[in-house]
Amino acid sequence: MKNLFIVFEGLDGSGKTTIAKMLSCELNALYIQTPLGYYNQVRKLIDTRADITEHFLFYLAAVRYASEEIKKLLKQQSVICDRYLYSTIAYHRALGLTLDIDINQMNLLVP
């Protein structure tokens, strides 16, 4: 069977982390929460100092990095991800950002 890539997106407090962790246990899959690695280490700095466009581009780069890392992980096991691309887009659109970007051109892993 092919390894699965499942993403849970949603509002803070909606239960996505709880469900994602439960499903990862049930499927014996790896649970991850984005952003990963370096991006997680510097996100507080970006969250407090970057303007909205810089903020969006940072998180978009973090999704791109996560996509590449998840591709590697999927060779070994299924992956359950807590937030991915659509949370980034929705959050920034809600803040009024209107960047015209074609996410299909980014060659991201699709859940």
Image: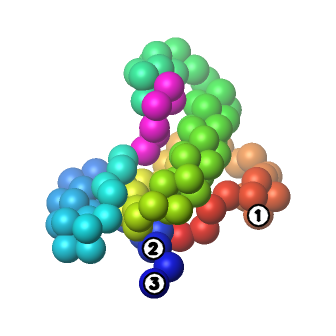
Please rate how many residues cluster around mark 2, counting C-alpha atoms within 10 Å: few if below 14, some from 14 to 19, many from 20.
some
| Looking at the image, residue 81 lies above or below residue 55 | below
Which residue lies under the disc numbered 2? 4
**Residue 70 spot, x, y in % from top left:** 52, 54
Please tell me in which quadrant of the rendered image residue 7 appears: bottom left
Q: Which mark is residue 71?
A: none
Q: Residue tagged by mark 3?
A: 1
Amino acid tagged 2 = Leu
Between the residue at mark 1 and the residue at mark 3, the CA separation in whole angstroms equals: 27 Å
Q: Which mark is residue 104?
A: 1
**Which element is circle 1 on?**
helix
| Identity, as a three-letter code, of the amino acid under mark 3 | Met
Q: Is residue 54 above or below residue 104?
A: above
The answer to whether 64 appears left or right of 3 in the picture is right
Mark found first going from the N terminus, 2 or 1: 2
Question: N-terminal of the two: label 1 or label 3?
Answer: 3
Residue 68 visible, this angle: yes
Q: Which residues are magenta?
A: 34-39
**Could one spot residue 102 in this view of the protein?**
no
Residue 5: where, in percent of width, then height? Answer: 47, 68
Residue at image point 45% right, 84% down: 1
Give the amino acid type for the residue marked by disc 1 in the picture.
Answer: Asn
* Mark 1 or 3: the one toward you: 3
Nearer mark to the viewer, of 2 and 3: 3
Q: Position of residue 10 (x, y in %)?
A: 36, 61
Using the image as rendered, state which of residue 97 and residue 72 is in the foreground.
72
- Mark in front: 2 vs 1: 2
Of residue 78 and residue 9, the one placed in the foreground of this image is 78
